[in-house]
Amino acid sequence: MIDKREVIEFFNGRAAGWDSSLKRNDEAIDAILNNACVHEGSRVLDVACGTGVLVSDYLKRGVSSVTAIDISAEMIRVAKSKIDDNRVEFVCGDVEIVDVGNEYDSIVVYNAFPHFPDGERLIARLSKLLKDGGILTVAHGSSREKIDACHRGAPSRVSNGLLPVEDLAEIFRRYLIVGTVVSNDSFYQVTGKRFI
């Protein structure tokens, strides 16, 4: 079982060098955000935002606001140092506990889902924060196999591994109408829409 205190310690210790270790796949990110319905005027909740990896992508799409939350104070500190835009609010805290409001058009969990102790509990919580017709997405900018291989090293104590995409879609179906289900060499993604 993942201990959230260990997650905080792990990511606090890696925040300073996080951006230099990233491998971005802009084409995959674009597809992920299209599937997540992030567009002009969207109100976005970025869950486990890290160093704000996707915040500039949201802003380029003309979103109305971004609430970016992460449990790691150091990740939030780095994100704040890079991004100064009045449409963005950074929150340091546990998204399963902290009040971040609701009525979001899009909620994005990018490259972070395996680090939550209970994935279904997270999905249940986030599904309640969507507006009617809003989209929740869990995505990774790489294949499931590559993510799991990466998490076999030092991150193994703070990772549950990435569920097969069909298993994640089945959990989504308990709370949302499933849309996109993708697991290929470029990216992994499941989206679900809140019932209208």
Image (cartoon, grey):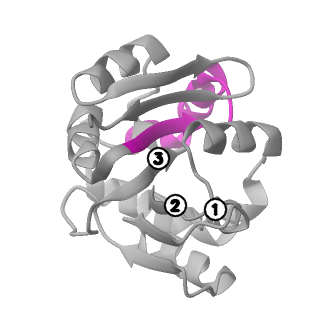
Which numbered circle lies on residue 58? 1
First of labels 1, 2 by sequence position: 2
Q: Describe the element under mark 2 as helix, strand or loop.
A: loop
Magenta part of the protein: which range?
Answer: 134-158
Q: Is residue 46 magenta?
A: no
Residue drawn at 55 percent across, 65 percent down: 41
Circles 2 and 3, Cβ within 8 Å, touching? The answer is no
Pick the front one: 5 or 119 = 119
Q: Describe the element under mark 1 as helix, strand or loop.
A: helix
Q: In which quadrant of the rendered view does residue 30 lie?
A: top right
Horizontally, is 122 left or right of 32 in the view? left
Q: Describe the element under mark 3 as helix, strand or loop.
A: strand
Indicate whether 118 appears above or below 93: above
Indicate whether 27 appears above or below 187: below
Classify mark 2: residues with Cα within 10 Å, few (<14), some (14-19) or many (20+).
Answer: many
| Whole-percent x, y for residue 69 in the image | 41, 66
Pick the front one: 53 or 105 = 105
First of labels 2, 3 by sequence position: 2
Of tags 1 and 3, the one toward the viewer is: 1
Q: Is residue 142 magenta?
A: yes
Q: Name the residue tied to disc 3.
A: 109
Residue drawn at 30 percent across, 34 percent down: 119
First of labels 1, 3 by sequence position: 1
Classify mark 1: residues with Cα within 10 Å, few (<14), some (14-19) or many (20+).
Answer: many
Pick the front one: 192 or 29 = 192
Circles 1 and 2, Cβ within 8 Å, touching? The answer is yes
Q: Name the residue tied to disc 2.
A: 42
Q: Give amino acid for label 3.
A: Val
Q: In which quadrant of the rendered view does residue 10 lie?
A: bottom left
